[in-house]
Amino acid sequence: MPREAELSNNERAFILEALQEDVRLDGRDLESYRNIDISFGDEYGVADVQLGKTRVIARISTSLTAPFPDRKFDGIFTITTELSPMASPAFEVGRPTETETLLSRLLEVALRRSSALSTESLCLLAGSKVWSLTATCHILSHDGNLLDSCCIAVLAALRHYRIPDTTVRGEEVIVHSIEERNPVPLAMLHHPLCVTMALSEGGEKVVVDATAKEQLCCEGEVVVTANKHGELCQIAKLGGVSSDALVLLKCVDVAVVKVKELDAMIAKALEKDATKRDVGGLMAELSAENAR
């Protein structure tokens, strides 16, 4: 079975000694992210996120389906991840690793169970027809901190996506094309984001946005999911090292600040994309035409 390339003893000792002195190989301080680049595809709902050398593309797709019998008034929202050998030799096609399983579960809690998306807004005919929305994460390159990269990509794609407008006549649902009506944004209730912090020195030192090499050296991780209003959605402690309560409180404080910064980056990228698409004020003209 393929395995992640292991660090040499010298390389591990060098990284740990540098962290003890609050020094990182790429020159960042312990609470800084690598450069983040967020871009969008030609279609709505495609987000490309690069966090250092880690790259993730998230794509949103929708289809009409019947709701679950016990959730007649709710649409369906699912998140899937695809890790290929192209991203890392430790990944195999068709054989989910522990990393992929953990990544899917954390994203599920962070975005779906926290009710970031209003599933009631996806309902068209109660008990009959709802939108089934799927967010698929394609990991193209892995250099640490996959969770934060995927969370940023999925949230950006959800905020960027436009769902087709519909008309309901009795039991009939008519889906309008983009030529007939402007598609509408999704009903987002809040914007949760994950901040992953690696722990070293017996759980006393906190390292934000660890690279793949730093993750191999550290003894555990803490994942904090929150929105820009400081509301916590999830705290997950991963790894065997124990952590003091004060360290966890510090992690929460750091995460709340970082979430505000990440949310502002996504908003700026969305605004830039909207300006690029709105050539000559065309979207405003079409919106006014629809209103009439």
Image (cartoon, rainbow, N blue to C red):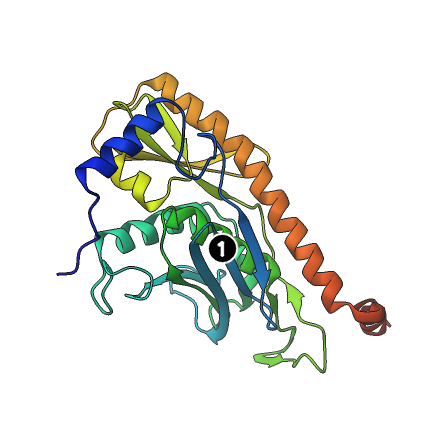
Side of 193 relative to 170 (left or right): left
Disc 1 marks which amino acid?
Gln
Count of numbered tags: 1
Where 201 falls versus 163 (above or below)? Answer: above
Q: Which residue is mark 1?
A: 50
Location of residue 163 in the rendering, given as x and y in whole percent from the top left corner: 60, 69
Q: Is residue 261 visible?
A: yes
Location of residue 202 in the rendering, given as x and y in whole percent from the top left corner: 25, 22
Callout 1 crowding tier (Cα within 10 Å): few <14, some 14–19, many ≥20: many
Location of residue 15 in the rendering, given as x and y in whole percent from the top left corner: 30, 33
Residue 89 appears in which quarter of the rendering?
Answer: bottom left
Q: For the N terminus, which image quadrant? A: bottom left
Side of 18 relative to 27 (left or right): left
Where 208 falls versus 39 (above or below)? Answer: above
Q: Secondary structure at mark 1?
A: strand
Question: Residue at position x 29%, y 26% from top?
Answer: 17
Question: Residue at position x 28%, y 65% from top?
Answer: 85
Q: Is residue 186 visible?
A: no
Location of residue 115 in the rendering, given as x and y in whole percent from the top left corner: 49, 48
Question: Residue at position x 82%, y 67% from top?
Answer: 284
- Camera-side residue: 122 or 160? 160
